[in-house]
Image: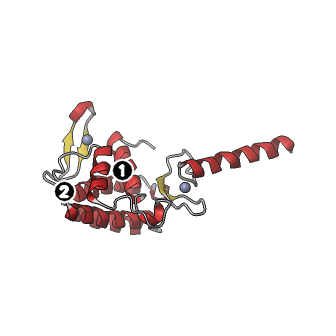
Amino acid sequence: MLIPHDTRIALDIVVDLVNTAPERAGSPEVDELGDVSSLYTFVKKYNISDVGELGEHDLNAVLEVRSRFEEVFAAPDARTAAELINRLVTSAGTTPQLTDHDGYDWHVHYFAPGASVAEHLAADCGMALAFMIVAGEQERLRRCEAPGCGRAFVDLSRNRSRRYCDSRTCGNRLHVAAYRARRREAAG
Ligand SMILES: [Zn+2]
Ligand SMILES: [Zn+2]
């Protein structure tokens, strides 16, 4: 599956965004986007540009968008996901623009000029998810199956076989399972 550079980044962002939610962050009480300064950190991490000064209303709008994205990851089928994504992208008021900024090859930005950070995320991450639906890959939008984890991830493995997120604990679980399987085979 060929995923354009910007789509890939937008997928990273949406996964990270969904995983800031308290019930997914390892500790039930901690929201990793609990205040405006953590929103600044998030925006900086991904170089989300032109969002201006951020305030409480930006934070609330981003948390609202995050809930919508959580629903997309929980969608049972492509049609449900498509409806959710359509609503999200429409609400962001997109204006697709071709750009080749900063040495990247031609790609499309979806957020409108002057978009808030929430609209920026809704538009560009929404379209990245839309791309997955178009490619027939909705089922690659997953939640980690490790007990007590449930973090969102996009399974980019060739045979869509990934079941665990790449956090240290869950990633290791995968290696341990593979190791045991090899040992069983060797003992066989
Ligand atoms: Zn770009
Ligand atoms: Zn996990």
- Evaluate whether residue 161 shows in this view: no
Ligand 1 falls in which quarter? top left
Tell me the element at label 2: loop
Work out whether residue 35 or residue 88 is closer to the camera in this orientation and state it.
35
Tell me the element at label 1: helix
171 horizontally vs 15: left or right: right
How packed mark 1 is, by other alpha carbons closer than 10 Å (few <14, some 14-19, many 20 or more), is many
Which label sits on residue 78?
Answer: none
144 horizontally vs 55: left or right: right
Residue 149, position as x, y percentages in the image:
54, 60
Residue 3, position as x, y percentages in the image:
40, 43
152 horizontally vs 123: left or right: right
Residue 119, quarter of picture: bottom left
Q: Are marks 2 and 1 in contact (CB under 8 Å)?
A: no
User: What amino acid is labelled 1 in the image?
Assistant: Ile
The residue singled out by tag 1 in the image is 13
What residue is drawn where x is 35% and y is 40%? 5
User: What amino acid is labelled 2 in the image?
Assistant: Ser
The residue singled out by tag 2 in the image is 116
Residue 24, position as x, y percentages in the image:
47, 62
What residue is drawn where x is 38% and y is 44%? 8
